[in-house]
Amino acid sequence: MNTDVPQQNAPLEASAASQEVLSFLANRRSTLVKLMQAPGPDAQQLDMILRVAARVPDHRKLTPWRFLLFQDQARADFGVHLAEKFSEDCPNADTERVQFERDRFLRAPLVIGIVSSPKACPRGTPKWEQELSAGAVCMNMLLGARASGFAAQWLTEWYAFDPRIETVLGLGESERMAGFLYIGSCDAPLSERPRPDLSDLVAPWLYEKT
Ligand SMILES: Cc1cc2nc3c(=O)[nH]c(=O)nc-3n(C[C@H](O)[C@H](O)[C@H](O)COP(=O)(O)O)c2cc1C
């Protein structure tokens, strides 16, 4: 297995067929954050997860995303803001509920915020494509975390869309959160959830003249 960073223009494998990768993808599942515990990735594992995440299709190499890491005390510090904004909106909430907000990022040893950061592109890469690339980053990160042996879940919850929290996160005008990847460990076995019936979703294209 080669996990080195390839040099620019280095030859890459032309055929990367792998039953192991197919099986991994066909059986992949998220882990509910409430089942997560320590440990999270060490520095080397985190570096690999971020590299895998950043290795996504990106039209015109605009890198329209960036990462915010929440580890150790930063998780609790961010929770203070969550609890504060939540209490503004729900002044009658009981203390347990507010504490839940304060502890949100403590549910996992590592939380990574993926910021969609579209760039003005004179050559015309649409914002939509750039946002899709940010979604691909989230998915690759989920896969990279799982393949590194960790439990992971992609969440947005209310704070991904709250303008006050966007300020706390330091988002620029065109930026928004693509999601938060919670990463930790989990011993509990995963069970399958319903999956779409492909026959409902796949059809040959038919052009109907009006
Ligand atoms: C953009 C995005 C945001 C999501 N946000 C939430 C969320 O806020 N709360 C939640 O319970 N699940 C959320 N999910 C769903 C979970 O990440 C995940 O799909 C689900 O737990 C099981 O999916 P899986 O086992 O196929 O990975 C979100 C999914 C996506 C793609």
Image (tube, rainbow, N blue to C red):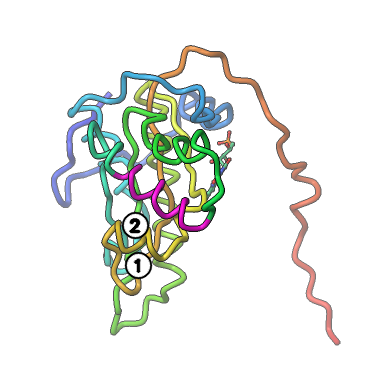
As shown in the figure, which amino acid type bears the numbered disc 2? Val
In the image, is residue 100 above or below residue 118? above
How many numbered marks, from 0 up?
A: 2
The disc label shown at residue 115, or none: 2
Q: Give yes or no for contact between labels 1 and 2 (Cβ–Cβ under 8 Å).
A: yes
- Mark 2 Cα within 10 Å, few/some/many (few <14, many 20+)? many
Instruction: Give the amino acid at mark 1.
Output: Glu
Tell me: is circle 2 under 8 Å from ligand 1: no
| 111 is higher (above) or lower (below) than 192 | below
Q: Position of residue 35 (x, y in %)?
A: 50, 22
Q: Is residue 79 magenta?
A: yes
Which residues are drawn in magenta? 78-89
Residue under pointer 1: 175
Point 58% across, 19% down: residue:
190
- For the C terminus, which image quadrant? bottom right
Quarter of the image where one finds residue 7 = top left
The residue nearer to you, when weighing 52 against 107, is: 107
Q: Quadrant of the N terminus?
A: top left
Question: Residue placed at 27% from the left, 64% from the top?
Answer: 61
Q: Secondary structure at mark 2?
A: strand
Relative depth, front residue between 17 and 82: 82
Mark 1 to mark 2: distance in Å? 7 Å
Q: Position of residue 19 (x, y in %)?
A: 50, 25
Going by the image, does 173 lie left or right of 194?
left
Q: Give the secondary structure at mark 1.
A: loop
